[in-house]
Amino acid sequence: MKICLGRGLWPADLYSEAEARSVPADAVAVSLGRGNQTALLAIEAGQTVLDLGSGGGIDVLLSAQRVRPTGKVLSSTSSRRSAAREMCRMVHSCRRATQMNIAITGANGSVGRTLLRHAAEQADVQAIACVRSERAAASLPVSPSISPWMTDYEAPERLTPALAGADAVVHLAGILMESRTSTYETANVHATRVVVDACRSAGVGHIVLVSVLGADESSANRYLSSKGRAERIVADSGLAATIIRTPILLGPGTAGGRALVRAASRASVRLLGGGRHVIRPLDVDDLSRAILRCCRNPGAGVAVRELVGPEPTTYRDVVASTAHMMGNDVSIGSMPVWLARLGAAAARPIRRGGMTPAVIEVITSSEIVEKNADVELGATLTPLSKTLEKLVHPNGEARDQ
């Protein structure tokens, strides 16, 4: 293992013109380092390079070019206080003989945290968990194989160092509900474009994009249109990609799971349209295992898969089943969808996000697929009853392996 200290004592003009041309111009422009550490080390294919204080990431990118295809590069821009802990964690991971390196965007979301737990259970997986803040990093599972990386999705050069050395990038970052600070354009479209550009700069060969059923760039629904545009950006990237379209996701901590438990725990509840739309709930554990299989077995080109749960049912029936498991006799009524959309439209200028007509359309549409991709993705689907048991008893049910 080669250890590179990013703030060296060597002159800053040691990068050759060829080296400068091989990395993003923005990375060179923002670099504050004082030398070319890679010129002083005999870096070869198959080695592991640990760069402490990577700054703009030039040494990370140059090292990644040399250690391919079997080596890897680990990088840190941590404060001095956490550098020692982070180095110990990285050195421990470097001792593994063969590893799959993945980077996950939006890692602090419910899917991201579940995916990280599954990754940590596999001895040969090293995960870079991309989050926006220290608070988000604190919510991640703790494991020697998980390395939090604070970044944002404003520009590719900020994300590129995190992706250097990754075999695959799992792009989870995105939103269903807009807010005053986050829109479909910024969170779903622009962020995807930044991730794709950063993947190109870092030399990542495979992207796994988690999308949604109904994604279509020509859709009149703003959310579905934004997800369709994100899919198009990935499909046109020139990189190998797997796009997984998903239905409502259920599991402890998921938004769908929390809403379901809230509804089932009441004495009476009014569901949009009476909850009569058809859904295909997917266990978030099943999705996580499918994602990891995609990372291990990347295919050529772009594959679009629709992965749904094993049983079609209505939302109304799922609420009733969950309530029964909780020992609750819930009375289910109906709220007209048109009335809810009218109220959401009237409140939109004030709230600027939240439950909009577009969101209501998405959550009340039936989830129909022509072919489930469970076989293609090698996914063994969890029966809906077991998924609901995990929601009702999150600490009393062992996760299905």
Image (cartoon, grey):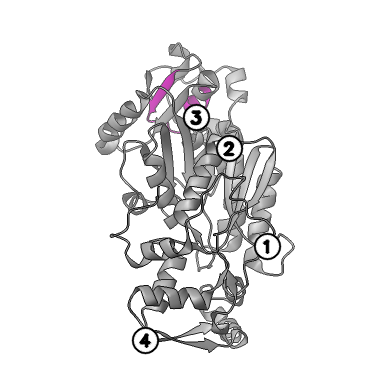
| Residue 299 shown in magenta | no
Residue at point 38%, 18% (across, down): 1
The relative height of residue 352 versus residue 142 in the rendered view (above or below) is below
Q: Amino acid at mark 4?
A: Ala
Magenta-tinted stretch? 47-62
The relative height of residue 112 versus residue 260 in the rendered view (above or below) is above
Q: Which residue is mark 1?
A: 225
From the viewer's perspective, tell me whether residue 293 is left or right of residue 117: right
The relative height of residue 333 versus residue 207 in the rendered view (above or below) is below
Q: Amino acid at mark 3?
A: Gly
> Real-space Cα distance between discs 4 and 1?
37 Å
From the viewer's perspective, tell me whether residue 289 is left or right of residue 241: left
Sequence-first disc among 4 and 1: 1
- Given contact means CB atoms under 8 Å apart, are the residues at marks 2 and 3 in contact? no
Sequence-first disc among 2 and 1: 2
Instruction: Identify the secondary structure beneath mark 1.
Output: helix
Q: Which residue is mark 2?
A: 199
Q: Which residue is mark 3?
A: 165
Residue 356: % across, % down: 57, 76
Q: Does residue 184 show up?
A: yes
Q: Residues within 10 Å of mark 2 (few under 14, many from 20)?
A: many
| Residue 61 shown in magenta | yes
